[in-house]
Amino acid sequence: MATSPDIVSPAMYLDGIPHTRFSEIMSNPGLMWHPYQDGGFWVVSRHSDVKAVSKQPKLFSSAIGHTNLWDLEADALEARRSIIDTDAPDHTRIRRLVSKVFTPRNINLWENVTREIAGELLDEFQRAGGGDWVNMVAAPLPIRVILSILGVPVSDADYLVELSNYLVEGTTDQPSLAPDAFGNTTNLRLLPFGSPASHALFEYGEQLGLKRKSDPKEDVVTQLVMAEEDGNRLSATEYRNLFHVLVFAGNETTRTAIAHGAMAFAEFPHQWERLEADSQI
């Protein structure tokens, strides 16, 4: 059995993306076993393998053990469970409810919103003569788009970015937040990332959901709290965890991708020239 090189330790990424390590993984056929603490996990690195795994939930479960690298107790599994930590039939039921929100019409509207916000940020970046790409473009773009789609006031953007940053920090050995930060009284092991920032994000989403139930708007939160099929609705836990995923996962991962994308173009300018010559690549 092939064993994967270490790709979990943060130290591996101090000098940039470890492409050599990734190439080593890709050069080996099949899956690779990655030891972690007292257990480990399988590294699935090829597109064809990812497709095969995603189509076999009985063999490769998202619900059993969740997407965490470490083991969680049963009550923590249930408290933290989101759509990405669910198998059929629950996953199918949630997808049917959520799919009513992500219609082609809505996606077209959101694309226009995204282009408008991106254009504004790029214009500001250009007028300033350049600057800090992360702070001026990569970080504000995804959160502004997400807040617009969800129906969250733009004035709350900085607060939600702050919560997202604390959630990332929650994966480290030395988080800076006290367990009772943001008024949290929940045991940290029951919160995503073991962070009180998750409590704050849950609370924010719950309050916004209550507002939309009494005063519906043309936004995603309204559609999520109103979604119904055959008498089924999202439970309170399903809604709050989905809100958590939409705000955090879409925000943190996208801003990181935009930042690294710009860095990659700076390191490989010929690729940028190819894109300029043919935007359909």
Image (cartoon, rainbow, N blue to C red):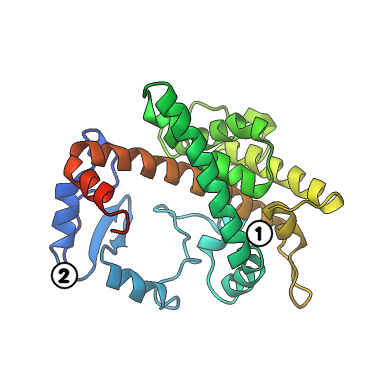
Q: At which x and y percent is residue 234?
A: 71, 63
Name the residue located 65 percent from the left edge and 37 percent from the top edge: 200
Q: Nearer the viewer, residue 68 or 236?
A: 236
Query: In this figure, which residue is indicated by the disc labeled 1?
Result: 238
Q: Tag 2, which secondary structure?
A: loop
Image check: 22 left or right of 83? Answer: left
Residue drawn 20% across the image and 57% down it: 4
8 or 21, which is in the foreground?
A: 21
- Quadrant location of the C terminus? bottom left
> Which three-letter amino acid code belongs to the residue tagged 2?
Pro
- In depth, the one of 207 and 170 nearer the eye is 207
Regarding residue 148, the answer to whether it shows in the image is yes
Marks 2 and 1 sit apart, C-alpha to C-alpha, by 38 Å
Query: Where is mark 2, residue-wise?
Result: 29
Above or below, 141 relative to 103? above
Residue 267, x across and y down, in percent = 19, 37
Query: Measured along the vertical axis of the image, is residue 183 above or below residue 236?
Result: above
Q: Three-letter amino acid code at disc 1?
A: Glu
Residue 265 placement: quadrant: top left
Furthest residue in direction right, as rendered: 214
- Which residue is drawn at the image coordinates 76% and 43% (left, top)? 207
Q: Is residue 120 above or below residue 130?
A: below
Q: Judge by depth and name the residue closer to the eye, 167 or 145.
A: 145
Q: Residue at x 85, y 49 (%)?
A: 215
Q: Is residue 228 left or right of residue 277?
A: right
Q: Is residue 176 above or below residue 34?
A: above
- Residue 113 drawn at (x, y percent): 58, 47
